[in-house]
Amino acid sequence: MSLPSKNWRLRNQRYRLVGEICEKCGTPIFPPRDVCPECEAPAQTPYVFSGRGEVYSYSTVYHPPAGFEKYAPYTVALVRLEEGPMVTAQLTDVAPEEVHIGMPVEMVTRQLQEEGEEGVIAYGYKFRPRMG
Amino acid sequence: MESRLLRTDRPVGIIGYGAYIPRYRLPAAEVARIWTGGEGETPVTEKAVAGPDEDVVTISIEAARNALARAPHVDPALIRAVWVGSESHPYAVKPTSTILAEAIGATPYVQAGDWEFACKAGTEALQAAIGFVGSGMGRYALAVGADTAQGRPGDALEYTAASGGAAYIVGPAEEALAVVEGSLSYVTDTPDFWRRAYQRYPSHGGRFTGEPAYFKHITEAARALMEALGTSSADYDYAVFHQPNVKFPQTVARQLGFKPEQIGAGLLADRIGNTYAGSALVGLTAVLDQARPGQRILLVSFGSGAGSDALSLRTTEALLERQGRAPTTGDYVARRTVIDYGLYVRFRGKLLV
Ligand SMILES: [Zn+2]
């Protein structure tokens, strides 16, 4: 799928961290998958995550794939959201050597990828060290 | 005489406000090191620089989220206008405002548009939002001024051209943390600064930049507003002027009879540079962070080309409870990572390969 159409389809979850919540057992779900991973009940009620979480694990990318050169080196982390789900995302506003497991982070919406000088700019969630 | 004020049909105010300043700082001494061998005075100490994944869209989103955090009773779906003023919209064609509206959950029944007027595009959007709410077209409107300003390498503007922005939710006066007492605009055709289509960097008209542009428009707008409202400089607790450097706002304040203590809280240029469409509006967020209820604030922007928007605000009791609901302007100013000229060149895409 092309970058514009994929990003457009996923814009709610990418821009605002909108997932779902299971009405039956109360499990918050991200990314949205319309079925509760805990009790397998259908789950389609939108739920906006707080964006707060902590770094569960991470690794730094020095040789990025095409479209990400501008942001390298950057750290990709598995972030455990305070509501429970785990998400994979880039960290930002942080030097690779400052990152550590358990670091409190918060969601920000940033440029994810650029299709060159003429193409679209994809925006979405990243995480940065929590302020204050 | 017909009033020069821009009048609303009903009283309007600011419901929520929020700033955003990127983390990176380029010291002016670092620019001087590259271009003048470190000789000469610099117009600011350092400026805020957007990181490689930041632009006017991302700056606007964070400022707007902070403004919404300070207006917890406002459902984003009730915002009927999302307007972003900037001279560095990431796309030439494709609005910043639709991306912002989507990111805060204001879509789809919302007016969206990008505004342009050099450094006063943000206050222009704010004035339009005041009119929009004041006419009853919508209960809430969001106005943002933000820039990732670019100076030509080696140009005098490179010391100050900075990144940052501020967002304001405008709504009915009875919900406001600061009520709009009145506003007006003063505009002439003046060739002090411009950027033609497809050019990366702006040009400026030397002798036009000071006296006939900045000082003329700000003093005329401020005096006309105070005359129309029957106020004088002594009636204001705070004044915020567009701040392309430190000296200009200090000088224009003196010309208008304001004392240094009236402009101190909102004068951030020395530490963050000139955030263009964000400049006066970020100064105002810093003032709102520390103002008390019942205080009066004068805000006067300046945009090249040229014009000034002047607004008189009075804070309410609601301010105290909302100040602490989001990071303050000072929190962002204090969050700083110094970069050198080389990293700056890379971050801002000045190296063309
Ligand atoms: Zn369930």
Image (cartoon, coloured by chain):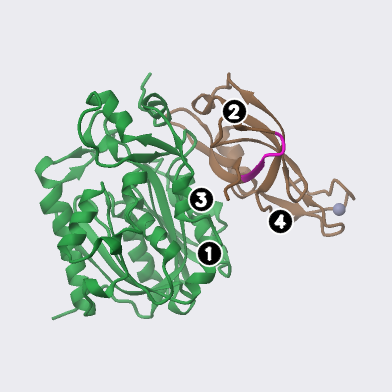
Chain colours: A brown, B green
Residue occupied by mark 4: A46
Residue, disc 3: B62
- Using the numbered discs, state the Cα–Cα distance from disc 1 to disc 3 in whole angstroms: 13 Å
Q: Residues within 10 Å of mark 3 (few under 14, many from 20)?
A: many
Distance CA(mark 2)–CA(mark 3):
23 Å
* Stretch in magenta: A101-106
Mark 4 or 3: the one toward you? 3
Query: CA separation, marks 1 and 2?
Result: 33 Å
> What is the CA distance from the residue labelled 4 to the residue labelled 1?
23 Å
| Dot 2 beta carbon under 8 Å from ligand 1 | no
**Which residue is under mark 2?**
A96
Q: Nearer the viewer, mark 4 or mark 2?
A: 2
Percent of width and height locating residue B339: 42, 31
**Which residue is located at x 15 percent, y 64 percent?**
B220
Disc 3: host chain: B
Can you say whether A18 is above or below B154 in the image?
A: below
The answer for which chain carries disc 4 is: A
The chain containing the residue under callout 2 comes to: A
For the residue marked with disc 2, what is the amino acid?
Pro
Q: Are marks 2 and 3 in contact (CB under 8 Å)?
A: no
